């Protein structure tokens, strides 16, 4: 979050020929990012649901029966881009809370950061990652 205070946002414009590896996952356009209200890690997070990359599968086992509370295990597969497993542009997966519309609430903090596996996949291993 270089130069951006915690809980603040900024707009970033991606061109179709961006040199960033993440340009594979982002269509050209202007998007809003925010710096979470946490001490570490200090990454920028997208507040718009525009990213073309998605995990191939995800499931959550909620072990908390309390209302408005959750605990349990999240299992998910590798990133997919254009119908193919592709993790080349990733270093890790950041698990963020989302609202019912699929947006990350402003000021949200990561629930977990999961490192990309050193073992590459070419198919959807639905439980490759677990947190």
Image (spheres, helix red, strand yellow):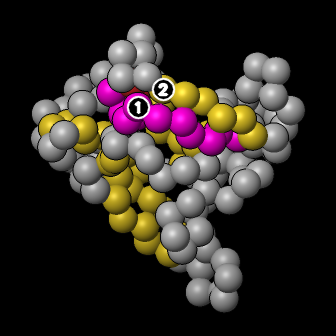
> In terms of depth relative to the viewer, which is nearer, 102 or 92?
102
Q: Residues within 10 Å of mark 1 (few under 14, many from 20)?
A: some
Which residue does the numbered mark 1 point to in the structure image?
28
**Which label's residue is closer to the chain start, 1 or 2?**
2
> In terms of depth relative to the viewer, which is nearer, 106 or 128?
106
Which residue appears at 81% of the width and 40% of the height? 8
Residue 103: where, in percent of width, then height?
56, 60
**Residue 102 sits above or below residue 27 on the image:** below
**Residue 43 sits above or below residue 102 on the image:** above
Q: In what element is the residue under mark 2?
A: strand
Q: Residues within 10 Å of mark 2 (few under 14, many from 20)?
A: some
- Residue 24 seen by the camera: yes
Q: In this image, 10 relative to 13: left or right? A: right
The magenta stretch is 24-34
> In terms of depth relative to the viewer, which is nearer, 43 or 101?
101
- Residue 128 seen by the camera: no
> In terms of depth relative to the viewer, which is nearer, 29 or 43?
29
Which residue appears at 50% of the width and 64% of the height? 102
Q: Quadrant of residue 9?
A: top right
Residue 85: where, in percent of width, then height?
20, 36
The N terminus sits in image quarter: top right
Which residue does the numbered mark 2 point to in the structure image?
14
């Amino acid at each position: 979050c270089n130069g951006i205070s915690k809980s603040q946002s900024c707009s970033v414009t991606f061109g179709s020929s961006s040199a960033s590896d993440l340009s594979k996952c982002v269509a050209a356009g202007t998007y809003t990012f925010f710096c979470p209200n946490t001490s570490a890690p200090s990454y920028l997070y997208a507040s718009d649901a525009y990213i073309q990359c998605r995990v191939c599968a995800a499931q959550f086992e909620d072990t908390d029966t309390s209302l408005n509370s959750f605990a349990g295990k999240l299992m998910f597969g590798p990133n997919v881009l254009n119908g193919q497993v592709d993790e080349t542009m990733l270093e890790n997966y950041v698990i963020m809370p989302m609202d019912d519309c699929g947006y990350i609430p402003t000021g949200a903090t990561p629930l977990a950061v999961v490192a990309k596996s050193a073992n590459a996949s070419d198919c959807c291993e639905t439980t490759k990652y677990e947190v």
